[in-house]
Structure formats: structure tokens, C-alpha cells
Amino acid sequence: MPPTKALPPFAAAFEGLVAHVAATLPAERIAELHQAFEKRTGAFGPDDRWFESRSRAFWDDMMTRQPAVRDALATVGEDQPWALALGRSHRGLFRSAADERGRLVLSDLWSGVTLFVDDMDDASRDALRAPTGPFDGTVVAVADPVRLALLPGAIFHAEDAEPAIVEVLGLARSRGLASGAVLDALLRMEMSLQVLSRVKPSYAYRAEALGA
């Protein structure tokens, strides 16, 4: 049996895949998807201090949840394993910890799943070394060899917002809301807390903000 070909590093592969999609899709189509993302998660612009993190989150959404990207990623050479993995992503609201082997352990507050992550970009690794609140993130996996990677567009909720978030999640479950709708609503609430920086998290994170 021939040896398994080494996978390209995830961070570099993802950056290349994003560049490929950005060059392949028409600019007006990307703009439409960006507008739809802002409608679901909250509007942002270049003057906002959260512009970079929200822009990375948009590309996470683009690369994993938008059908328009699938054809653009059909043939991308050595990065193909990661390209295929993007269509099988798991988005969650994660708490992070480290196991005895030093791997990142992500526990999803919404689904209850626990994931052991191998790869991420340096900025995400640095962010997760500090105490954080739960974060909205997306994980992808390849099977041969098995590796899990965290996409770079994680959005971190305030640490002191977790009790209010847990309450909102309970209400969302009782209403039978879909995962994506709940996580998008929480991103709108996170932006409200950023904009209204003097208010308590319980004001930004509340059932009324879940939407219909």
C-alpha cells in the first residue's frame, strides 16, 4: 500500500482556497452574499473596530455554507481534501480547553458535541491561549489521516455574557429554532453589546433578539 500523501497545512490551504473563490466568483455575487450575511448577523463597515473579525466570519460562511462556492472549489489541486471538507463543516458555539496531550478541545454549547482540533491559524491559537467567553466557530475535518481544523473567522462573545447566552440557548431550544438561525441571532446580539458598550450583557442577549 502506498504511503498516505501528507496534507498541506490547513491555514495556508484555506487562505489559498479563499483567494481562488474570490478570483472565480463574480464580484457582484460576492457582494450579494456579503449583504445577506450582514442581514443575518449584523451590519459592519471598515470604520468598525470589529471589521476584521466580522470579515473573516463572512468568509467562513462563504466557504462552508454557500452553494455558489461548491463549483468554484471543484478542482483545486493539492488542497482538494480541505476543499471537500469545507462542505462538511460543523458550526457551533464553543467553550475551549486543552487535553492532557495539549490538543484543543471544543465543547459545543448548542449541540453538545465535543471536538478535538488539530489545526488552526496563528491568530486563533493566540486568542485561545487567553481566557475567553464562548465563541462562534466552524470546524472542518478530513479523514485520511484524520485531522480537524478550526476556520479563522471565530467570533468571541464576552466572557461575562455566558450566563445570558445559556439562557437564550434554552429558550431557542424550547422554540425548536434551527442551529444557524440561533447562532446568527447571537452574532447580532454580540454586535449590539459592542455598539452599546455601557449596557449589561443581559440587555443585549435576550429572547426578544432571537427574532421570529
Image (cartoon, helix red, strand yellow):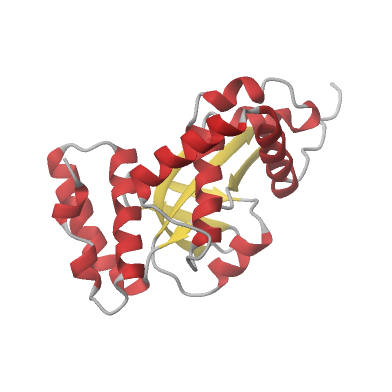
The image position of residue 193, as x and y in percent, is 31, 68
- Vertical order, 36 against 69 (above or below): below
Query: Of residues 30 and 77, which is closer to you in this image?
Result: 30
Quadrant of residue 188 in the image?
A: bottom left
Residue at 41% from the left image edge and 55% from the top image edge: 94
Q: Is residue 9 visible?
A: yes
Quadrant location of the N terminus in the rendered image: top right
Labels in figure, total: 0
Name which quarter of the figure residue 20 lies in.
Answer: top right
Work out whether residue 83 or residue 73 is closer to the camera in this orientation and state it.
Answer: 73
Q: Residue at x 25, y 70 (%)?
A: 201
**Which quarter shows the C terminus?**
top left
Q: Does residue 170 lie above or below 79 as drawn?
A: below
In the rendered image, residue 90, in percent from the top left (x then y), is placed at: 46, 39
25 lies left or right of 53: right
Q: Residue furthest right?
A: 2
In the visual, does 156 lie left or right of 208?
right
What percent of the width, then of the height, locates residue 34?
48, 41
- Residue at the location (79% across, 26% down)? 77
Give the left or right position of residue 209, taking residue 112 as reference: left
**Front residue of 100 and 161:** 161
Up-down relation of residue 9 to residue 187 (above or below): above
Q: Position of residue 171 (x, y in %)?
A: 15, 50
Is residue 112 among what the camera can see? no
